[in-house]
Image (spheres, rainbow, N blue to C red):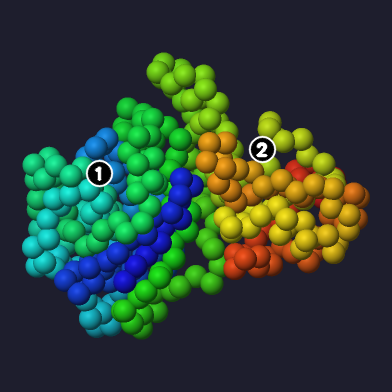
Amino acid sequence: MSVLFETNQGNIVIDLYYERCSNECFNFIKLCKSKYYYYSPFINVQKDFICQCGNPQYPQKPKFSNIYDILSKDNCVYSNSCSNSKLKNNQAGLISLIREGPQGFSSEFIITLTNDPKRLESLENRTSVFGSIAEGYGTINRINNSLLDEHNRPLKDIRILHTYILVDPFPDPVDVNFRIPQKEPFPTKEQIDSFQFVLDEESDATSEDQYQLKSDAQALTLEILHQIPSARIKPSEKVLFICNLNPITEESDLQRIFSRFGDVISVDIIRDHETGASLRYGFIQFGDAESVERAYSKMDGAAIDGRVIHVDFSQSTKRARQHRK
């Protein structure tokens, strides 16, 4: 059984020990399936020790602690009690739920960042191991090496953007309170207000670090809010913004697909300046505004390479259209 987290720093694939830790795995996978973890920030990053995630309402307390809080006991085969698996945090890449009370656990989890079992002994009786990282150690390393504020939170937010269930052996609970959203949830106002992209003036970060943080912050904001950062990009009525791209999608693919709406002057997928990897958003410039209108009316919500995309007008074009209405 596996779950994939898509974050703004890369993907993480987690293998779950569902046979030995059924209570924990049921809780975790059903929270993932209900899209509970969307926009949860990584916090409490202690370099070469642990990092923590799993509270989408951070810094506030979550609305409920685990899936069992909302399920009727009569409809649930599993329970909020730690499995007697005897698994311990003794190496890097293990994932465990934070315990709540003498036997229960919460939605929040930690990922170990060290292979030193002595250091990890302090987690004994505080967490319940239920899985391990199968893929995405590059992402984990980026979290581990993040610039942090005084609360051990990355200065540039690292958040879960999507969750995908690769294998689920558990039947969904038949309960009126358990729902699987049909649409991707939009971040709440509280979540948006808690986005953290600002470097403290007394930070040791270099000007290059600050520039990169601001650049990455804009990319994440675009990804989450489907907005164009006017400070960086000059809007044009002939330019269409596109996001939620599959990382494998290339400029030539978009050129071919969108050329049926008019003359495509250029296609730019924004990429990481070091790795060249797609940041999954970009801009398509047409020869005229009418082509942009046609493309928008047909392609918003369309699927390209298996990913439902979002297209939009630039902010200035939006305001002009709204004013005309």
Residue type (three-letter) at the residue carrying disc 1: Leu
Nearer to me, 252 or 81: 252
- Closer to the chain start, of discs 2 and 1, is 1
Rendering quarter of residue 149 = top left
Q: Position of residue 10 (x, y in %)?
A: 45, 49
Rendering quarter of residue 252 = bottom right
Q: Position of residue 236 (x, y in %)?
A: 82, 41
Q: Which mark is residue 229?
A: 2
Nearer to me, 51 or 69: 51
Q: Position of residue 135 (x, y in %)?
A: 36, 56
Give yes or no for contact between labels 2 and 1 (Cβ–Cβ under 8 Å): no
Q: Is residue 95 visible?
A: yes
Q: Position of residue 50 (x, y in %)?
A: 24, 43
Residue in view at x 41 percent, y 51 percent = 40
Please state if 171 lies on the left or on the right of 100 as rendered: right
Residue in view at x 78 percent, y 61 percent = 256
Q: Is residue 313 above or below residue 64?
A: above
Q: Is residue 56 visible?
A: no
Nearer to me, 320 or 94: 94
Q: Residues within 10 Å of mark 2 (few under 14, many from 20)?
A: some
Nearer to me, 207 or 151: 207
Residue in view at x 49 percent, y 47 percent = 8
The quadrant of the rendering that contains the N terminus is bottom left
Q: Residues within 10 Å of mark 1 (few under 14, many from 20)?
A: many
Mark 2, mark 1: which one is toward the viewer? 1
Residue type (three-letter) at the residue carrying disc 2: Pro
Label 1 element class: loop
Residue in view at x 28 percent, y 82 percent = 75
How many numbered circles does the render carry?
2
Residue where numbered disc 1 is placed: 113
The residues tagged by marks 2 and 1 sit, at their Cα atoms, a distance apart of 34 Å
